Structures are given as structure tokens and as C-alpha cells.
Image (tube, rainbow, N blue to C red):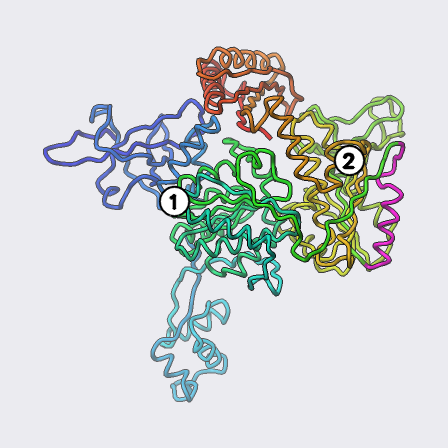
Amino acid sequence: MAASGSRGSERRLIARVIPLTQTRAITGLYDYLLAPDLVQRGAGVGSLLRVSFARRTLPAVIAEITERSELPPERLVSATEMLDARLPAELVELAVWLAGEYCSTPARALAVLLPPGALRGIRERRVLVASLTAAGVRAAGADGGAALKPPLGRRQREALAALRGGPRRAAEISTPLLRRLEARGLVSLELAATPRPAPRFRVSSTAAVALPMTAEQQSALAEIGVALARERPGEEPLLLHGVTGSGKTEVYLRAAEMVLERGRSVLVLVPEIALTPQALARFSARFGETVAVMHSGMSDGRRHEQWSRLAGGDARICVGARSAVFAPLSDIGLIVVDEEHESSYKHEGDPRYDARTVAARRARVHGALLLSGSATPRPESVFGARRLLMAQRVDGGALPQVEILDMRGLHNPLHPQARLALADCRRAGGKAIILLNRRGWSNFLSCGSCGRVWMCPHCEVALVLHRAGGFMACHHCGHRERVPGHCPDCGSVSLARHGAGTERLEHELTHALVDEHFPVMRLDADAAGIDARARILERFHAASSGVLVGTQMVAKGHDFRDVGLGVVVDADQTLRFPDFRAEERTFALITQLAGRTGRGGAEPGAGGRVLVQTQDPAARAIMLAARHDSETFVRGELRRRKALGYPPFATLVRIVCAAPSAGDALRVGQTLARHAAAAQHPAAVAVLGPAPLFALRGRARCQLVLRSVDREAVIAAARDAVDAVTTTVAGARGAVALSVDVDPQ
């Protein structure tokens, strides 16, 4: 509908909006007249509208309110519909920053930040609630309604008695029964907002009570207190570098208490809710109803309720995984990033944000203290933050003894010494954790006669055998096939399985350690969903003895008090990846698994035992992890990265081109490289590639990497190159897809 210009003194407000479309070419703001009723309803920055855009009706977010437009009034269209949901103005600004920082679009960034279910109109949960009327109170008195005519039946008297304690959900008693009492004027029935049950997590008996602190914890907390008292604490982040079991969570809790006393709010990030339940449980136990939980595994309805509690100020602490970094908290005083080394803080969708970087941004905007923590911090964090060291475990126990086992010449998944150690653990009624960072039964299946290897038809990777389900699967696109009985090429039934995954290891241990009192459990991505993984952890936690086999999930921050043995299988697997972070990941994986053992006096006088199986026993990362020497490892990593020009001394941007054919992908990659190399920026930007990648989901791919010591320059070069290519290939929409990853992991 075309809008007329202003007449006389009539004041018309203009909304500058961001249409929520996935089209990369649409990045600007678009002007719409605000209908008077929307102004009266308080439309402002962050409000969601429905607008007519490009012959469609699209949702849009107001980014600015103004009284002037570059367009003449007769060309402006009125926005007449406003949705109930609203995004805080600070988060709208954050979305614009996010789009620029990660070479995305404001619309795609806003899609990540919107209130849960905002575009589907999710409302608060309402249920029928019964309460006594004044007549009902009298009837439920001393005579229990015996004087009423006709007299109340037994079940009706019981219902009135139940309501004397206060309103109850109708379904808890009997809705038809209560309707009959309502007809007699004794009961009132009405729909009332009722929150969904909060998630429950295991809470230890001491979780609600502040634990005694060691001298190292007290020193760290004192430093945090000094930082919080500064005028601009967001400018100097702190890194709590403490060995596993040193009590970092208790320091977080005390720091949060200090911030709450100042009347400010707290944001706590953990790598994955289901795998770090103790942090959430302790915050919930210590601070009660003021804690809200947010993570992507929750239903939209529950997330909406938690989001609303935070936005309304009913909850002042938010604990959650990666996406919780966008929680609508106001006046944040502290942001905690627990286990900051975890790669799960990096988002894989567009925009490919890093929650740790977003947390730093929000800390600066709010003037909040950013407190990161890890036993194996990233070199980037050590370089960019002031460290608070905690080198001792809170229980006074020693760190576990780590032994390196040479697997050269051996073909069984477990070293003989590892088998003996497991047998000893079973006889002693102890617990063990075995880490094998590869799920499934075997890495791949081949024909012993003609050499055929079963490959994914959509990706250039081998299918992984999952024996229990009788299928082979691609761990990239999810394609599945039944396990063949013979080779379709030569007819041979001589099919060989290569390598071992967690499923095979679980099977072998179950048969080797036949003991109902020593169960074997498995935790990996095949345990679908947060609840399934949490149940496995609960089962292992509650067992008096047993062994937990799994991928890197088993090493993620668990606080098991009675694990005496840890085994790392194929420890050098990650060293074989063509990635400058390969040594960092290997060191962290071994150190973190070692940190699950020897807590709470699992072996009196010792810190437990860890066996590291490897084909490369002299590898630097493995030897330093065996010595628990994080300091030497980080110093060496920083020297190496400085010499090679890797982060934190430079910024990398990875651009992936996907197309129907390898030639198409390569041509677009070469065009991107030319634009990036020709870009005019103050700092030099090196362009590496394009180089081919394996096909994925039926699409050929290539990649190029941009590198510069100037972060703004390299991001701008990537953005300009992508914008130029997007314009060039606009006519072939869908033929070529571009993916931009700033700070690739």
C-alpha cells in the first residue's frame, strides 16, 4: 500500500528494517512508514514486522527509527503488522557486528539471535487451574460441605480439601469433577500461564554449599575481584589456567556471587550441556530460580520461556552451550567460558561465529569481565589474556601417572598392558575410561579379492561400518547402506574390515570382561540426543564399577570421583591431520582424558593411571602431555606459530566453493583469488589456493585461504571478493555455493 506524505504537523515515523531473507546480495536497510497503531504499540528498534518486500511478505527487524528517508514519501510503503516478539536493541547491534565480522549478512545473523519461535508465534504455556471461591472456602471448612443441599459426594469433598492448600492444575484432580463444582459456585477454573518443567541435572549433596577454597583458588578469586572493580573490566580478559580437578568451577561460582551482589547479571558458557552437567547443576543448586538454561537441544517452547525469563530480568544467570552467548541479559557483569579450548564453541552454520569471540565482544560492550578457563588453554587465549594459574588439585591428590605404550607392530586395538590394567581394574571393582576418537565398528570395508572399497556415493570418503545396526554410514552426509554379503564387482565373499571404532572396542571388552558387576558402556555420537547421552553418563556415574568407552565426549569436563584408569587408543590419530592445530588437539585430548582419572582418592596416595597408546611415542605433543607440561607445550606452540604466521599472530579466512562439477568450483575459486589479491587494503593479504577438496553431499569443492596480520584487512578482502563473485554468479543461482569461515577450526 503506497503511503501518502505528511500533512501539516502530522508526524510520521520511518522504520529502517532488515528483511529476513537468506539472499546474500540483500544486505542493506529498507525504509517503511510505520502505521500509527504500531507507533502506539511501541514499535522500536528490535521489533519484528511483516513487510511487503520483492513481491512477497517477509518478516523484518527494525534496525533504526527515523523521521527522514532518502526516498520521497509517495514511494514509501507502510508497515502495518507487528509480531509479538521483540529483540533487545543491543542484540540488533550485535547481529550487525556479527555479519561484518564473519562475512555474512545481517539477516542471517539475526536468524541466529531471534527469540525462540519468534516467527511461529510461540506463546507461553497455559493450563487449566482450579481454585476455591469464597463459597468453596466455607464449604471446605469444618463440616466439609455436609450442610450443602444436595450434599457433596466423597470425591467432591476430597477435591475441595485438596484445593485448601492453594490452586492446583485441574488435570491433577479431575477436570469433569471440578466442572461440576464450578457449576455450584464452589470452584473457579481459569487458564493460567504455567512454565514447563525445568531441566533436571544430578546435583551432589554439597553443590548448594560453598566449598572450602585452596590458597590457589583464593588467590585467583582475589585477582578476579580486583578486575571486577576496574572501571572497564571488559578490556582485560582473564584466563583461569588450572589443572584438571583444581576447582575452577568453585571459582566461577564465587565470582558470579560477587557480580550478583553488585546487581549485575552473569553469562556462563559450557561446551555442551549434556557433557558438562556438573557445572549447570552447581549453578542451579547454588543460585536456584535465578538461573536460566539455554541450549539448542531444548524444545522451542522451553527455550522461549527461558529466553523470556532472561529478557524480563526474572533470571540473572544464564548457563548454556554455544548459542547461549546471545542470551538477552542486560547489564552483564561477568562472562565465563568454561573449557575454552573446546572446538564446539565454533558454529558450523552461516554465520560461522566463534562463541568465544562473541563473548569477548559482549564483554567489551557491557563493561563485563571475560573469564575463560581450561586445563589446556588455546595458545590464542594464553597470548591474549592475563593468566591465573592453579597447579594443584583441590583434594591434594597427585595428577595421574601417564605411561606411553608403543603400538608399532601391534594390530589389536588394545596393548597387552592395557588389557592387564583393565583386568586389574575389574578385580579391584574400580572404574575405567577408554578414549578412541573414532566411532563405528571399522573405518572401512574392502574386498579381499579385487580391492574394492565401499565409498559414499555423495562424498569422496569411505563408508564406516556399524555392525550392530547392520549398516555402513557416511559420517559427513548421513548416507546409509546395508552391509553387503559379497562384492558386487567380483562376487567374492572375502570382505575385510579395517581399523577399529568405539562399537568394536565395546564389543570386544564386553566379551573379554564378562562380569555383570563390571558393565561396559559406550558414549559417542551414535547416542543421539542430549537426553540419551546424559543417561549414559548418569549410568556410569551411579555404577559402583565399570568401563566407559567413547570418543572425545568422554574427556569433556566430567567430574567422576572414582575413576582410577584411563586409556587413550590411537593417540596420534589427530597428529596425522593436515592442520596447524593438530598438535594442540592431541595434547588437549590426552591431558583432558587424564584429568578424568584419580579424582577424589580413586587410588589412595596416587592420582590414578593413564595409558597412552601410539604409533609415534616420540611425538612432542604426546611426550609433553604425559608429563602434564602445559607450559612448555604452549610456549613451543606460540614460537612455532609466530615463525609460520599462524594465529594468534595472523588471522585466517577460509572460503569454500561448492558446485556441480570440479571445473565450476575451481573457476569460481580462481575468480575469488583474483579479487582477493587485487583488493586495496592497507595491510598485505596473502591468498593461498584455490586447492581441491573431497566432494561432499554430491558437490565438488575447492578452497582458498586468506591470511594477514591485519584482521580487519583480511576480513574486508574476503567480504569484497565474495560480494564481487556473488554479483557475477547471481544469474546461476544455486549452481555455486560459497562458504566463508573466519578463524576456521
Q: Could you tell me which quadrant the N terminus lies in?
A: top left
Secondary structure type for disc 1 = loop
Where does residue 294 sit, x and y in percent of width and height?
A: 51, 49
In the rendered image, which residue does mark 1 sit on?
231
Task: Please give the name of the residue rendered at 86% of the width and 41% of the height, measured from the top-left corner.
Answer: 415
Label total for image = 2
Report the side of 354 relative to 639 (left or right).
left
Name which quarter of the figure residue 646 lies in: top right
- Residue segment shown in magenta: 409-429
Q: Is 506 on the left or on the right of 591, as rendered?
A: right
Q: Is residue 166 magenta?
A: no
**Horizontal placement of 8 versus 299: left or right?**
left
**Closer mark to the observer between disc 1 and disc 2:** 1
Please give the label number shown on residue 472.
none
| Residue of label 2 | 465
What secondary structure is marked by label 2?
strand
| Residue under the image location 81 percent in, 56 percent down | 518
- Image coordinates of residue 579 in percent, x first then y, are 66, 26
Residue 426 lies in the magenta-colored region: yes
Local packing at callout 1 (Cα closer than 10 Å; few below 14, some 14-19, many 20+) is: few
Q: On screen, 436 above or below 735?
A: below
Mark 1 vs mark 2, CA separation in Å? 58 Å
